[in-house]
Image: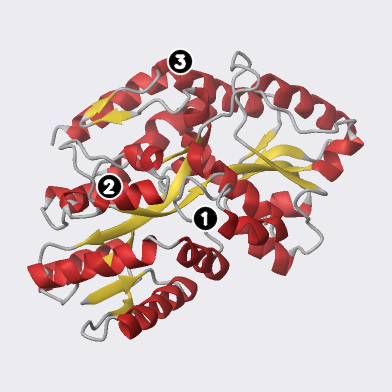
Amino acid sequence: MVFWSAPNPTQEKFWRTMAQEYMKDHPGVQVDVSPMPESPSSEAGILTALASGTKLTASENVFVGFGAQLVKSQAIVPLDTLQGYSDLIRSRKAEQLVAGWKFPDGHQYILPLYSNAMLYAWRMDILKQLGYQEPPRTYGEILALGQKLKSKYPDKYVLARKVLVDPNSWWERWFDFFTLYDAASDGAPFLNGTEVVADRAAVTKVMSFYKELDDKGYLLTKDATDPFETGLAVWNVVGPWTLPYWKEKYPELKVGDNVVLTPPPVPDDFPAGKTPKTFADSKGVVIYRNASPAEQQAAWEFIKWVLSDPRHDLTWLEMTGLPPARGDLTTDPVFRQYLAQNPGLAQYAGAVPTGVPPIQNEKFADLYTLMGERLMVPVLTGRKSPALAFDDMKAAWAEVLKR
């Protein structure tokens, strides 16, 4: 069988290691691992391979939006029809996680491999100079922080994020809109099949918050290099991949010391003590229909072997720094020592159960681009109210979804 890893050296190394160990115990099986093409994108590389008949049995690096495209073209196997699927999910305590990965036909086509539940970072060294001992939790508390920050440091900002007004950077909507929407709505769906079912109140609260940040001068939407790291801004959305970047380029930033990680902020009426949901940059494993039945079965047996042993998940975590999509990362003793030595990563591991995956639609790039054009930019430039801009975006999405 042929398995494509993500075009990332650490992920390729993990899968090669697993394949070598598997083949030692299964001498009749050959698992060939290679990285998927990354230009112009890994998704385009997979589609080209499927169209050209390139031998491909299974791969990782598939998110639900691209998965919807593969499902529509009947390119991948429904994994929940394979023997042992339910046992594997139970063993990973992942029942809650996979619920968001179910497709409209009721099947599970992608086995979640990792889940980067997004958190927010705060410059506590600067906040302490303003009298704070802990970061703000609500929109109102953040706006109050902005007033104190500008009074003491007029050149600093609460948030610096140029891509908020760049519709072409469609993937950034995962991090600047959906992190806050998933928290404000308590994880309410945004799209159901081809119908926008978003929590309207949550959308308007999120966009009103951004607008007020901008109106009061607390938000910077112009070019700035590493504004959080340099202290130009005190707040930023970050994924676990940021931690090794800080370690290498900004070693003075220490999580738990001068930097604190928190869940997304919430509207002022969000219940105190309740843990907010957050967007999760998550990807998983699929098996392709164009492989022979024997190859599909061989791929499934290999995938089950890899993902049924938590020690393999620990190896994944050590090699990639990406939290495995398991519901027991903070409770299984296998992970305890490693997470204790990596407190920043431990917080991401703890957030995995709160992660909400992206919307399931094959037209994801068009939809997210429209979100920038019809919602984010009109609100932040003052051309439309959050409610009116949301109505315009819904109408534009409806046109795309009915094609």
Q: Mark 1 — residue?
A: 323
Say which of 18 and 309 sits in front: 309
Question: Which color scheme did the rendering employ for the protein?
Answer: secondary structure
193 and 323: which one is in front? 323
Residue under label 3: 201
Q: Nearer the viewer, mark 2 or mark 1?
A: 2
- SS assignment at label 3: helix
Determine whether 195 is above or below 236 in the image: above
Q: Dot 1: within a 10 Å radius of its alpha carbon, few (fewer than 14), some, or many (20 or more) residues?
A: many
For marks 2 and 1, the one nearer the N-term is: 2
Per the image, label 2 sits on a secondary structure element best described as helix
The type of residue carrying mark 3 is Ala
Tell how many labels: 3
Quarter of the image with the N terminus is bottom left
Label 1 or label 3, whichever comes before in sequence order: 3
Give the number of the disc on residue 385: none
Read off the residue under disc 2: 86
161 or 317, nearer to the observer: 317
Horizontal side of 150 relative to 46 (left or right) equals: right
Query: Residue type at mark 1?
Result: Pro
Residue 40 coordinates in the image, percent (x, y): 32, 67
Q: Could you tell me which residue is drawn at 52 percent across and 28 percent down?
A: 183
Residue 143 as seen in the image, left or right of residue 372? right
Residues at circles 1 and 3 in contact by the CB criterion of under 8 Å: no
Residue 10 in the image: above or below residue 181? below
The Cα–Cα distance between marks 2 and 3, rounded to whole angstroms, is: 37 Å
In front: label 2 or label 3: 2
Q: Is residue 98 left or right of residue 50?
A: right
Q: Position of residue 92 (x, y in %)?
A: 41, 50
In contact (CB < 8 Å): disc 2 and disc 3: no
Q: Residues within 10 Å of mark 2 (few under 14, many from 20)?
A: some
In this view of the protein, can residue 315 be seen by the observer?
A: yes
